[in-house]
Amino acid sequence: MGSPHRYIPNTRADVEAMLKAVGADHIDDLFADIPEEFRLDRPLTMPAALSEAELMSELTRLASKCADADGYASYLGAGIYDHYIPSVVDHLISRSEFYTAYTPYQAEVSQGTLQAIFEYQTMISELTGMEVSNASMYDAGTGSAEAAIMACASTRRNKVLVSRAVNPRYRQVLQTYAAPRGIDVVEIDFCKHRGVTPVSRITTDLAADAACLIVQSPNYFGIVEEMEQLGAAIHAAGGLFVAVVNPISLGILAPPGSYGADIAVGEGQPMGIPMSFGGPLLGFFATTGKLMRKMPGRLVGQTVDSSGRRGFVLTLQAREQHIRRESATSNICSNEALCALASTIYMSVMGPAGLRKVAETCLYRAHYLRDRIESIAGFTIPLSGPFFNEFVVRSSVCADDMNEELLAAGIIGGKSIECDYPELSGCTLWAVTERRTREQLDSLIRELEVLA
Amino acid sequence: MSAVKYTRDHEWVKVEGKIATVGITDFAVQELGDLVYVELPAVGDEVRAGERLAAVESVKAASDVFAPVSGEVVEVNEALEDEAGLLNESPMDEAWIARIEMSDPKELDALMDRAEYDEFVKEASH
Amino acid sequence: MKGPQPLIFELSSPGRTAMSLPAPEVPTPDVGSLLPAQALRHDPPGLPEVSEVDVVRHFVNLSQLNHSVDNGFYPLGSCTMKYNPKVNEDAARMPGFARIHPDQDEATVQGAMELLYSMDRYLSELCGMSRFTFQPAAGAHGEITGLFVIRAYHESRGEHRTKVLVPDSAHGTNPASAAGAGMEIVVVKSDERGNVDVDDLKSKVGPDTAALMLTNPNTLGLFEENVREIAALVHGCGALLYYDGANANAIMGKSRPGDMGFDVVHLNVHKTLSTPHGGGGPGAGPVGVKSFLEPFLPAPLIKLNDATGMYAWDYDRPQSIGRVHSFNGNFGVVVKAWAYIRSMGPDGLRTASEHAVLTANYVMRRLQPYYDLPYDRACKHECVLAGTRQKREHGVRTLDMAKRLLDFGFHAPTIYFPLIVDEAMMIEPTETESRETLDRFIDAMIKIAKEAEEHPEVLHDAPHHTPVGRLDETAAARKPILRYTKES
């Protein structure tokens, strides 16, 4: 019997009474079925319990050793972006009734979660122009992998084409998932000048037995791909078209549904979710009505209750692991529901006009910065394709040295990408959100001018 | 009308010439409860006896339907695509699932008649 | 209680908004001059146009339709719905954790890396493992990661093992994850005591077996008494033993999977380590392995340079299975779990498991006279009862009783799982519930058993006092409506 703890309410007297009721003399009697050799006969070797005040001091010590985006102007993107999160988002997802509930298995006492997911599915469908959305995946990387697996299952083909301009990390996740299933992943190279995936590289030979083509737009370099042509090329060969998209960009860019995508996935983090060192994130996943039953993940559907009132339930569950087991469309169970709720609140706050405006602001500020950097001697823009809020810069200064200097000036500079793209040596990737003010952009330019 | 034969996996099969019409039994439907979706095979699929032919889903379960005989699927009951509930209403008649052009009608000999099937169900539910 | 609410789309009014954005402050040429016309959106997405007050009231009203741990007992078996400490929420929201980017230079995120590094040490000690990865974002994600590791290990030895053994009592994620890892599933039976049937296991384990996946205590809430023999059998043929940590809340500081012979474990931190379930996620499913499997873990891991005291990402892992998450896994969730472990300490963790087991046994024994108990032995952190007699004698199904429980202000247990128990009710009270709460729940369950005898119709029509009545799941599945459309 341990000492009293704030999270364990039963007292010694309670324990005695309960032991008596179960007919045991000691708590250890209840562990008698653990073979003796496997009973731990010593305390765990870890630090002793902290009081709440001590815990907060320790956490503050650790947190203060990190340079956060409140204290620094960050230009990192590559899948995670520093967008402004309206105050109401965190207030509302902090409602205990949302965040301390589990998966809505008992629909009659889970209408809050269920209706919010139904609204989320509707908003994602609207945003992507697709017919149906699931209730979320872990992130864009696993979402892309699941899209590839779904495409293989529905076309009965075993090869996946993916553009090399898709985020390298998403491609790594795809590879991890594909290899054990015997799915062949073939990468399509991008154009070294424009930074786009040329449709001419989707040859008849390559596409003939491909389950799908995966293209990201804006791609890893921030460049907008020629999605309509790419989609047509893979469709002509009987494969599916998988679009990986940035949800904020869809405020101004054509939605996947408009150019014939069969599956649209993406990272929902830009919509109201903190960067949190890369997680928790939000993989959104949408598809066509035709492919609805091949979809991974949970789905919420509308129905009626015993007196005919509208209500919501988890539905089409026969696709899922708890019913189909090894034949399920995916093994996913827990998803990112609270992040999906955050994005639903974000989209409600923004509305169609707000989403357009935030996208435009990112676009304008990114172009301003790109133009100014291009005018600095020693800096060039190696890829000429049209871009949204992210672009590649080549500089004569070593990226590490540059970023060290910038950090001293309160700036977190662009990400070096030459590890993933040796042909882009000396290149860094810069993202601009609506949080980067004109003043911050100008101060960055001044710093770069000094470095050049 | 020819006799109906039954499998141990609760399919029924009705034969007219070389064509076998396949469905699931009233007993199976009763066990599965309200059916919500039927995954039909495609016309032209080649199936072998004992292999998966289709799948039926209730809210909380999914069950495979196995081909009682080998052959080519020549027709599927498209009415089930939109109206899986038909299986609950008329499992042995209107809600047939597929028609197979048999490649080996002798396979029918291994199947049960109604009396044998009823006995089998009685035993199985003990 | 509140009744059904309008959809947010039904509150929409053209021109209304809740947004607040800065002016661009830079040149604003026509968007068409920056992007090709073909790439532009023509019709705005059909998002709602609402005010900030509308947004706040709508979501607060929705929240009030939910049952949650913070408004009542939630004995959902296998889900460990323990209290979610509030201070942990504060921790994850600190800017030094919440507002950092995964691609920042290591020198600027040392605190976050130290936290992950020390968490690896804590979890390794807790589970008797050597090293953990934090990339898996959920339990099932952990399972598939563990199986990728197992597969890579066998292949590194030139062995192509294709079969994963899974008990018939296992969570559905086990076979689904094994299939996702390209494996064939072989089901192992349970014996009459609720353990893995060792004879059946013997007949199925062989040179093509890659692993046995085991939950211990299993989904019946029972400790696998023959775990030593099971481990010997599995290891004897060169296969590995995988520990599904869904039920680890029963054994913290009492017994360790690593000591029992497990080679790979995943923990559900949203169960065992108190992080909130968020209405279905996010969770986190860190995976730990014995030292011989470390080379196969997802890259990168964190290493500590003893000389400088600095933490660094270790990408130089040639045998790694690769990446399973786009970034570092659900770091924000791991921060909460870290705060929990530091708040509990070794003594607190052990006490938590002891109390979790005691409360489950208490509920089981108090309810035993009223419901069937398929396996009559001390349970661990959860017990499985059955409503067989209510079904047989009164035509009342477990589903009816579960729905009736909602009327008493309790969440229902997990029902119809594990699949091997007829009319199963899996009850997991957790250590954070007081005896008074347990007694109220027990009283409600006893009352429901009496209602089944005397007024079965009350149960058939339940629930009666929830925001909506019993919902028609069949209609939902037959004609799926998965989104709002303006016309409808």
Image (cartoon, coloured by chain):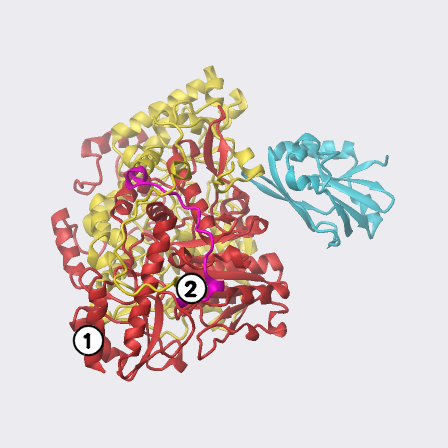
Chain colours: A red, B cyan, C yellow
Q: Residues within 10 Å of mark 1 (few under 14, many from 20)?
A: some
Where residue C445 sits, quadrant-wise, is top left
| Depth order, front residue of A359/C268 | A359
Disc 2 residue type? Gly
The structure residue drawn at horizontal position 42% and vertical position 24%, both measured from the top left corner, is: C370
Q: Quadrant of residue C402 in the image?
A: top left
In the rendered image, residue C41 lying in the magenta stretch gets the answer: yes
Relative to B34, C460 lies left or right = left
Point out which mark residue C32 bears: 2
User: Marks 1 and 2, Cα distance to the nearest angstrom?
Assistant: 31 Å
Q: Are marks 1 and 2 on the same chain?
A: no
Identity, as a three-letter code, of the amino acid under mark 1: Glu
Left or right: residue A147 versus residue C21 is: right
Q: Please tell me whether mark 1 or mark 2 is closer to you in this view.
A: 2
Q: Which residues are magenta?
A: C32-56
Quarter of the image for the N terminus of chain C: give it. Answer: top left
- Front-lying residue, C261 or A291: A291
Position of residue A194 relative to residue A232, above or below, is below
Q: Is residue B56 above or below residue A361?
A: above
Question: Mark 1 = which residue?
Answer: A447
Residue A64 in the image, given as x and y percentages of width and height: 15, 61
